[in-house]
Image: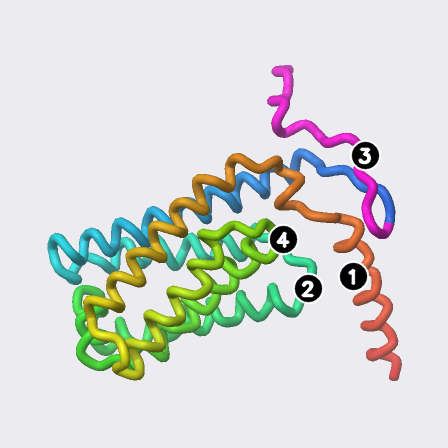
Amino acid sequence: MKEEISYFKASKTIEGVYGDFIVTPKDKREVVFYRISILSCGLFFSLGLVQWITNGSNQVWIYFSGLVISIGLCLRWIHIYLRPLHQALIFFWAIGCMGIGIIVYHFGLTNFFSAIEENPKWLFLVGPIFISLTGLGFKEFFCFRKIEAIGITIFIPIALIGHLTGLNNEKFTFSLLFLSSLLLLILGVRKFDLPAEADIGDKSVFDFLESQRKEIKPDIETS
């Protein structure tokens, strides 16, 4: 049997708030998947905007599809202590996917972004996708104080809300989105400098919150 790669070996016992725990090889694989997903978000976001600049918006849907899938994978592998917050981000992502489906049904894939550009109100259907992305950025800033993460959290809402309200011109909106994509790409690259344990967090907190949830659920069912 081949010797297990050292990165994926179980950690030593770590002291948590509610007890000791270890970071398992499975945990570390999930961290790798999460980090690859974030990096993919940055790549698809940046390449899509470059495609828009150089060749117009007709084929941008290819990169946007990659971005949406990558965000979904991030939400699959992310570790957030508060389960309702995690579920809320997944909910927004799902609503945004349905909104994308509605726009594609009416205008087709190649005219997807042209329709939003001509009528910003369609952005309401796509906006929840970016709410999820902004939530990911906020989580990264809150946990690791990465300046590029707070940039994503601020610039994406300003760009989209400004476009919806007409306060931003197209050049300013595009500049903010492009800056956000670069910050997301930087965030994705820098994530690989951190030990896997950093993204896992305190597993004893997860276990404690899960036990509390299970205790509450039977009480509700029997009441």
Specify the label residue 87 is tagged with. Answer: none
Tag shown at residue 79: 4
Q: Decide: marks 2, 4 in contact (CB < 8 A)?
A: no
The tag on residue 82 is 2
Q: Residues within 10 Å of mark 3 (few under 14, many from 20)?
A: few
The residue positioned 51% from the left and 36% from the top of the image is: 192
Dot 4 or dot 1, earlier in sequence: 4
Proximity of marks 3 and 2: CB atoms separated by less than 8 Å = no
In front of the other: 116 or 66: 116
Q: Are marks 3 and 4 in contact (CB under 8 Å)?
A: no
Q: Position of residue 201 (x, y in %)?
A: 69, 48
- The residue that disc 1 covers is 209
Nearer-N-terminus badge (3/2): 3
Is 4 a magenta residue? Answer: yes
Q: CA–CA distance between discs 3 and 2?
A: 24 Å
What residue would you read off at disc 3?
13
Vertical position of residue 41 compared to residue 28: above or below: below
* Of the image marks 3 and 4, the number of the one nearer the N terminus: 3
Q: CA distance from mark 2 to mark 1?
A: 8 Å
Specify the segment rendered in magenta: 1-18
